[in-house]
Amino acid sequence: MPINTVGRFEVKYLQVVSEEGILDSALAPALSDTEIRKFYEAIILARTFNGRALSLQREGRIGTYASILGQEGSQVGSALALAKDDWVFPSFRETAVFLSLGYPLHLMIRYWMGDERGMKVPEGVNIFPMSVPVGTQIPHAAGAAMAMRIRGDKRAAAVYFGDGGSSRGDFHEALNIAGVFRAPVIFLCQNNQWAISVPRSKQTRAGTIAQRAIGYGIEGLQVDGNDVIAVYKAMKDALERAKAGDGPTLIECVTYRLDDHTTADDASRYRASEEVESWKKKEPLIRLRLLMEKKGILAKDYEDSVLKEAEAAVDRAVQEAEAMAAPDPADILNYTNAALTGRQKKEMKDLGWRK
Amino acid sequence: MAKTNIVQAINQALTEEMERDKDVVILGEDVGRDGGVFRVTEGLLDKFGPDRVMDTPLAELGILGAAVGMAAYGLKPVVEIQFMGFIYSALEQVFSHAARVRARSRGRFGCQLVVRTPYGIGIKAPELHSESAEALFCHMPGVKVVVPSTPLNAKGLMLSAIRDPDPVIFLEPSRLYRAVKSELSEGGAAMPLGKADIYQEGKDITVVAWGTMLHRAAEASEGFDCEIIDLMTLKPFDEEAILASVKKTGRLVVVHEATRMCGLGAEIAAFAAEEAMMHLKSPVIRVAGPDAVTPMARLEDAYMPDAARIKRAYETVMEY
C-alpha cells in the first residue's frame, strides 16, 4: 500500500524593505509619508526613553529594567497597526508598544521604580498590565479574543512574547484554544535570539517559531522584525483576517536583543561580541532611515526636532514620575480584593495603615 | 415540593444567573453536550448555546488563562475543572494572574471569575480525582474559597460566587453531590460569602467543619453537646462566628479531610489561640488527614476522618 502524503506545509517569510533600504513596492502597504514619519518618531521616542531608563537604573533612580534596544521595529510596526479599541497583552519588554499606544511615559517610569500605580492603565487604553512570568499572558489574549467574538465586537487582541515564551505550555495551549474557537487574536513573537543566556537554537528544534502555527491549524508567518514596514503589514493583514472571522495568526518577528537581558544581566558571559556587532548593522532604525532618505523625508531639521521633542517628553516624564507622592502602604491591602475582608481591616489597623 | 440534590442546585444557580446576566459564560472540558462528568451543567448548552457554554480542548492551563482574559474583557466566566487534582497545571494562572490582576493594576482591572471543581475524597475514583487542596488557595491572597455542604447553600453560595468581583474557587464535595437533598425554590436567595452557618447549636464543643466533613462531624456528635459551624466560605472565613461560639463553649475541634500539615485547621486553631485563649478550657484539636498523598479507592476510607476519630476528639476536649 502506498504511503500517502496527508499534509504539506510551507512557512512564509516577509520582508518589505531590504537591508539597503529598498522598498518592494509590490509588497508594501499603502503608507503616506506622514505615516512613515510616525514609525520614525515612535522609534526615536522609545529609544530615547529606553536609553534614559538605563541611565536612571545606573543612577539608582529606578530598579531592574529590561531594555528593548534593537526590537523597536517589531514593537512599533505592530503597535501602530492596531486600532484604538483592540486589546494588547504585553510582556515586560514592550516599552515601544506601550509608548506607541500612548501610554503615559511617567507611569512607565513609575512602574520601573517599583510602584504598582505605574500599571494603573488609564481608562480608554486597552493594555493589560505587563506580565512578568514569561509567556503566561498568551492565554489571556486568547480568552479576551474569545470574549470579543462572543459579544460580536469587531476587535482583536494582540499578545507579545519572545522566543523563550514560545517554549512554554501557555503558548501551545493558547494557540490551540484560539484556533479551535477562531478567536480574533494575533500572537506576536519577537524572536530576539536569546532567552537570557539560552539561544534560540536551544528553545526548539523547529526551524522557525512561525511553523508552530501549522500544528494548531492557524495562520503563521515569519517577518523581518527589523523591518518596521514589514511588521506593520503582517500585523495589519492579520488583524483584518481576525476581524473578518478568519481566526488567529502567529507572527514571528526575527529580531535581536542588542542589550543585556535586563540591567541585572551581563550578556558578554554567554554571547560573542561579533554576533552582537553583526546584528547592530541590521537594527531597525538604520533600515527606516535609509528608506526615508531615499524618499527624501528625513531632513536634518526634522530629525533634530524629533529627537529634541522625544528628549523633552522623557525629561518631563522623569520629573513627573519622581514628583509623585510616595505610594500609600494601605494600598497593599486596598487592592488585594475588591473590598477589604474583616481580616484585612484588622491587619490595616494593626499595621497602622488606616488613616 | 420536589427534593433537589447539590448537582441540581448548582445547575439551577447557573441557569438563573445566566438568564439574569448575559456576561456569565461557562467553559471547561465536557461541560457542553455531556453536561459535565457529574452533569452539573446538563441542559445549559441547549438553553444558552455554544457561545456561552463552551466545550474546550483538554487544557486546564489554557482554560484558566483564557478565563482570565475573558474576565479582563468584562465577561464573568464560570470555569469547570473536571476534578480538583487536574487544576495543578493551571495554578500559575490562578496564583500569578487571577489573584493579582487587581493589585497589579491598582484596581483598573479585576478578575471576576468562578472556578468550580469537584473536590474531596469518597467516591472511589481513580488517583487524583479526590484531592482536597483548599489550603493552597486559602493561602493565596486575592482569591476566595467556598465549599458548600447542602443543596440550599450550594445554590445560594454559587449565586454569590458568580456575582462576587473577586476570583472564587468553588469546591464541590463530590461525595455529597447526590447524597444530600433539600427542598429548593426557584429564584432562591443568594447567600453572602464570608458568613458561616450554625448547623447545630450546642453548649460544650465548637466544631468547625465544611463539605463532607460537616456531615461526619454531625454524625459523630451524638452523645455530645456540640455547636457545629458549617464554615462554607473558607476564605475569608467567618471569624466572628467562630469566636462567638468558642467564647461560649470553651472548646474547639476542627475537622477536615485534607492533610493536617498547614491545613486550614492550623489557621483556625491559631486564630482561636490568638483571639480566644482565655476562653479555652482545653487544647484545640484538629481531626484531619495524615501527612500522606490521598490514597486510591481501597484505602480512602482509612484516610478520611471517620465518626470514631471525630468522636475521640470530642472525648479528648471534654476531658478538660
Image: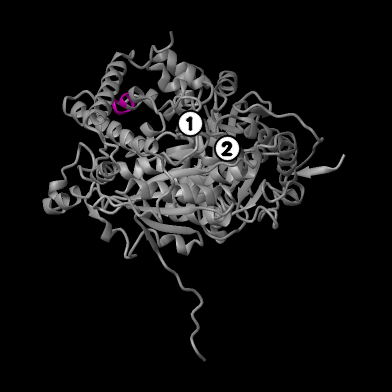
Residue most extreme to the front: A296
Q: Chain of mark 1?
A: B
Residue numbers of the magenta segment: A109-113
Q: Is residue A135 visible?
A: no
Q: Main secondary structure of the magenta part?
A: helix
The residue pinned by badge 1 equals: B142
Packing grade of label 2 (10 A; few <14, some 14-19, many >=20) is: many
Packing grade of label 1 (10 A; few <14, some 14-19, many >=20) is: many
**How far across and down, in percent of the image, does residue B225 sit?**
66, 29
The residue pinned by badge 2 equals: B113
Q: Residue at x 72, y 51 (%)?
A: B45
Residue B21 located left or right of residue A134: right
Q: Tell me where residue B233 sits by quadrant.
A: top right
Residue most extreme to the bottom: A1
**B180 w.r.t. B299: above or below:** above
Q: Is residue A313 magenta?
A: no
